[in-house]
Amino acid sequence: MSYLPSVLLAAAGVLALIVVLIRTVRVLRRFRRASSMVTVNITDRTGLLKARSAGLRVAIEQRRRPTPEQVALVTSKEGGH
């Protein structure tokens, strides 16, 4: 019966290892989900920022070089005033 404490201790160790592994897997799963949500959010915001900067570039370019229609509206006597 001298081997019984060793077997019980080994079984308790294996059980503790299983519990720790299950908890670790759960935490990693939650972390992966949160990380994925952050990545999607950052990607969306980056896309919006790129769209806004492109819109600003177009608006600045239009102010620098107006189209003939815009020039005609500004120079005509009836030009929308």
Image: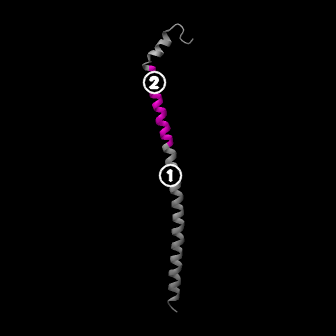
Is residue 49 inside the magenta stretch?
yes
Locate residue 23, reporting x and y percent.
Answer: 54, 66
Judging from the image, what secondary structure is the residue with disc 2 in? helix
| Towards the viewer: 58 or 17 | 58
In the image, the segment drawn in magenta is: 44-63
Mark 2 surroundings: few (<14), some (14-19) or many (≥20) residues within 10 A? few
Q: Residue at x 52, y 45 (%)?
A: 41
Q: Is residue 67 above or below residue 34?
A: above
Q: Earlier in the sequence, mark 1 or mark 2?
A: 1
- Which residue position is annotated with label 2? 60
Mark 1 is on which residue type? Answer: Ser
Few, some or many C-alpha atoms within 10 Å of disc 1 (few <14, some 14-19, many ≥20)? few
**What residue is at 52 percent from the left and 7 percent from the top?**
77
Residue 65 sits in which quadrant?
Answer: top left
Q: Which percent across, then down, holds residue 57?
A: 44, 28
Residue 78 percent location from the top left of the image: 54, 8
Q: As displayed, is residue 18 above or below residue 29?
A: below
Which residue is at the front of the view, 69 or 7?
69
Is residue 52 located in the magenta-colored stretch of the structure?
A: yes
Give the labeled residue for mark 1: 36
Dot label at residue 54: none
Which residue appears at 48% of the width and 9% of the height? 75
